[in-house]
Amino acid sequence: MSASTIVSVDNLVKRYGSLTAVDHLTLNIGEGEVFGLLGPNGSGKTTTINCILQLLSYDHGQVELFGRRATPTSYDLKRRVGVVPQEVAVFNELSVRENVDAFCALYVSDRARRRQLVDEAIDFVGIGDFEKFRPSKLSGGLRRRLNIACGIAHKPELIIFDEPTVAVDPQSRNAILEGIQRLNREGATIIYTSHYMEEIEQICTRISIMDAGRTVASGTADELKSMVGTGEKINVGCSVPDEATLEAVRSLSCVRAAAYASGHLLVECLAGDHNLSDILGVLRDRGVSYGRVLSEPPTLNDVFLEITGRELRDEA
Ligand SMILES: Nc1ncnc2c1ncn2[C@@H]1O[C@H](COP(=O)(O)OP(=O)(O)OP(=O)(O)O)[C@@H](O)[C@H]1O
C-alpha cells in the first residue's frame, strides 16, 4: 500500500443471514481523490461505508484508514473522518448552530476554536440566515446542508457522503456538489456514493461501479466507458430515407441498431473512431439531405447495462 492511500478495503464480506450485502470487495482510495461508489439501490454502498467506518462488524476482510488497521475503537482514526449519512441525522430540539456545535464538540473541546469552526461550516454550506432555526423549520435541501455542516465542521481529512442529494431540489443539489468539490480542492479526500450517474461523473476522479455487493468495474469515467463495446447514440435530422438506405446504415460494422421516426434517424453505435462520418457518408452517397446532428457519448448507465444486463435505474 502506498503512503498516500487513505482508505484500503481488502476482501470485505458482510452478510445479513443468507444475504451477502458486500461480497469480497476490495477498494483503494488515494489522498486527494473524489472517489465515487456508483450502484443501484441495494447494491451494498451504505453497508460498505458502515464497514469502513467500523459501525458494522463484518464477516471477512480488513479495512485500513490512513495506513493503519481500523477497528471499532480506533478513535484517533475516526476523528480524522467526517460522515454525511444518507438520512439526515440532526437533533430536532437544537437550533442549526447548536447542532453544528454539538457535532463539532465530539472532536474539538476548545470553545473559541469550535466557534470559529462552526462559523466556517455554516458559512461553507450557506445556511447563515437560518442559524437560529430548528431543523424542522428548514426545507429538505437546507436540512441536507445542515447535515453536511455537522459532518465537516471539525475539518476531517476524509469525508464520506452517502447519497447526499436524494430528494433535494436542483439548486441545493448544485450547491452540495460544488461544496464537495471545494472541500476536495481544500485538501479533503472524498468518498461519494450515489445511484445518480450524472453526479458521479460530474465530480468523481475515479469510480467503482457496484452491483450485488461486488465491484463490477472501476476506473475513471472515460476508462469505464472504453471498457465496453457501446458507442455513441447518433441522432440525424433528415428527410425520410428509403428502406435500402436504412439497410445500408444498419449494415455498417459500427452500427448496432438504426431506425427512422418523426424526421430523425436514430443510430445506436458500437465503440468506434469514425462512426459519425461513416453514417453521414451513407446518407450523402444516397442523396438523403440532413440538417442537425447530435451525438451522445455512452453513459455510465450504458456501462452498467452492458456489464450486468440491467439498468442503473437512474432517477436524476
Ligand atoms: N440491517 C440489515 N439487515 C438485513 N439486510 C440488510 C440490512 N441492511 C441492508 N440490508 C440489505 O443489504 C443489501 C445492501 O444494502 P445497502 O443499504 O448497503 O445498499 P445501498 O447500495 O446503499 O442501497 P440504498 O441506496 O438503497 O441504501 C440490500 O439488499 C439490503 O436490503
Image (cartoon, rainbow, N blue to C red):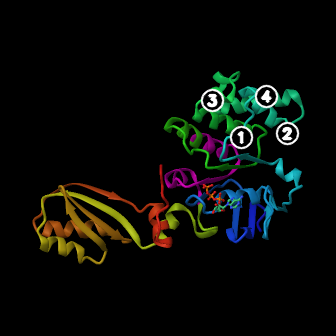
Q: Secondary structure at mark 3?
A: loop
Q: Which mark is residue 106?
A: 2
Q: Is residue 225 above or below residue 147?
A: below
- Discs 3, 4 touching: Cβ within 8 Å: no
Give the residue number, with chain letter if any, for mark 4.
116
Rendered residue at 81%/27% (across/down): 115
Rendered residue at 52%/61% (across/down): 221
Q: Which residues are magenta?
A: 178-206
Q: Earlier in the sequence, mark 4 or mark 2?
A: 2
Q: CA distance from mark 1 to mark 4?
A: 22 Å
- Discs 4, 2 touching: Cβ within 8 Å: no
Residue closest to the eye, 164 or 206: 164
Q: Amino acid at mark 4?
A: Gln
Q: Residues within 10 Å of mark 2 (few under 14, many from 20)?
A: few
Q: Secondary structure at mark 2?
A: loop
| 148 with respect to 198 (left or right) | right
| 148 with respect to 307 (left or right) | right
Q: For ligand 1, give the image quadrant.
A: bottom right
